[in-house]
Amino acid sequence: MKGCIQIIMRLAARLLCVLCVLSGSSFFAAALDREAFTITKYDLDVRLEPEQQRLGARGKITLRNDSQQPQKTVALQISSSLNWRAIRAGDKPLQFVAQPFTSDIDHTGGLSEAIVTLPAEIKPKDSVELEIGYEGVISLDMTRLTRVGVPEEIARHTSWDQIGRSFTAVRGAGYVAWYPITTEAADFSEGNSLFEVTDRWRAREASSEFKAKLQMSGENTERPFSVICTPSESRLTSTEVTNGGNCSWQQLGNVAPTFAMARYVSESKSPISFFSLPGHESGAKTYLDAFVPASIFVSNWFGKPTIPVAIADFADPRAAPFESGTLLLVSMAAADTKLAGVNLVHELVHSVIASPRPWVYEGLAHFGEALYREQQGGREAALDVLGLHSAAFIDLEKDAADPRLNVPGQPLVTSFDETYYRTKAAYVWWMLRDMVGADALQQAIHNYRAADDTDPKYVERLIETASKRDLGWFFDDWVYHDRGLPDIRVQSAHPWQDANSKTEKQTQIVTVTLENLGLTGAEVPFTVRCEASDVTQRLEVRAKSTATTRVEVPCIPLEIVVNDGSVPESDVRNNVFKIIDEHQGSQK
Ligand SMILES: [Zn+2]
């Protein structure tokens, strides 16, 4: 019944929107290319009034026509809970039609769209600067989740964005359009539509410049609010900057500009600033205590952390953590030591390495988490960290490899899909570590310079130079193309006793042939198991190929297990191979 009402409500909302498009602006509906323009520069002044949950913004944006055609109109979109007040070019007010636009890219499930008639036609690659003004409220809104059937209790802790009287946290595009965007409609219920539209938007804005000055208005008799957006060291030491903050990026990369505002207790352990809420002292202490070991680990592996990073607390202890660039929002209400350590390592890796490439920036941070767990709990603990979110990624890769689905793969090197640049990238860095060793990979990471990372093959060359190994095939399969995952099995295993062996009688040699059924190659570990001990070796098996090697074992081999979980595979059901008794002791 509940689902039924939701569907009806949803249809009604859609119908309303369609009607208004038809009656209000049918002229634009046919011709409008909503993604023709990319906003290349934002310069906004944002006033926040927590008592009224209000946001008011004024400023300038620069739009570039990235389409092939000249454009006379542009569709500017903000959250449906905000309203357009003014749009001008130079000192001339521009005509615009404001209309609701259904899209799940915003937490309200809708956008306020202004269809603006530009003063002149903008040619492809040309830009235009507009002055804009908009205002409204940003309150807790779970619409886009609840209308596809997510229970309210879960939606509340996921869709937590709001300007609140005592606590504010608002994420950028993909969550709340608190600054203008230009996108096609995104739909949660239609496969990957929401993610595709959001990823496309992030990719288009990756080299855009973003500047927003946030200022809280209203009297402050109590302890002042801290406004946190882009972490900066200087802001913490200066008292005049409370009640205000800066969101500033030369290049957005994969950042969704996010701000938080509360009466935080702040503590700095350079380069990390910790912002905790009163009452969460013990959790905050857990983070502070985890800082030194995490910092030593990251300094040894990746280099010295220097870029300012902030970790800020949530008022809702069950709020889903969120990270954007160098700001991590995570509840400190009951912080777990292990989790605090891993989170700190992640943020400290960001503090060492800036990169315009999401797979390098986030991939290395997640890889760092796994390395840290390996140091504490061994290889298995590390593989657990890598595998934590692997299900979604493996599903996407299965689709990419299935020719019947015709799903285009996503090369990691240019992907703006979180599943790829976080989960897949972490595996790729881990496999590289296993292949070339820690020393060579560390050397390559130390030599990495964001400014030099302009050629897609830059990272490959750094690691090849450090390891003196040809990795072209690996980067081709895992980074430059996306052809799904490997599927490796033992094709055959023949144990035999070396007649010339001068070693103990028990020593056996096993000739192992591995077969890769997938379109992506890998160097995979495999273990020959005996009753008393195991021997693990590694073997490179290219796509749609076999590879053979010999393994010496000190006892009678019983089975072979291929892949310990460090190589993501499309099918792991064929990874155990039982060695048949009749082969035992036979001579080759
Ligand atoms: Zn990160």
Image (cartoon, rainbow, N blue to C red):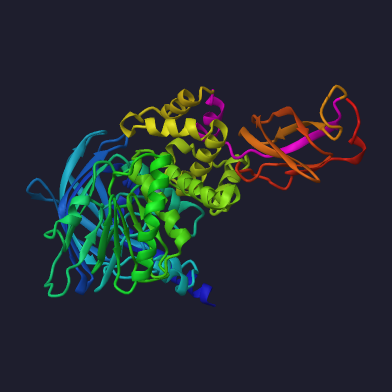
Q: Position of residue 5 (x, y in %)?
A: 49, 75
Quadrant for residue 107, please give it: bottom left
- The spot of residue 490 in percent (x, y) is 76, 37
Residue 244 place in picture, x, y as percent: 16, 60
Asked if residue 489 lies in the magenta stretch, the reply is yes
Quadrant location of residue 444? top left
Q: Residue furthest left?
A: 91
> Which residue is at the far bottom?
1
Total numbered badges shown on the rendered structure: 0
- On the question of residue 85 being in view, the answer is no
Of residues 161 and 576, the one drawn nearer to the viewer in this rendering: 576
Q: Which residues are magenta?
A: 470-498
Q: Is residue 453 left or right of residue 433?
A: left
Query: On the rendered structure, is 516 left or right of 305?
Result: right
Instruction: Identify the residue at horizontal 76%, vertical 43% (top origin).
Output: 533
- Which residue is rendered at x = 38% and y = 67% of the image? 283
Height in image: 398 above or below 134? above
Quarter of the image where the N terminus is located? bottom right
The residue lying at 32 percent from left, 62 percent from top is 20
Quadrant that contains the C terminus? top right
> Can residue 79 be seen by looking at this rendering?
yes
Residue 96 magenta-drawn? no
Q: State whether residue 427 is above or below residue 143.
A: above
Q: Is residue 100 above or below residue 477?
A: below
306 relative to 342, above or below: above
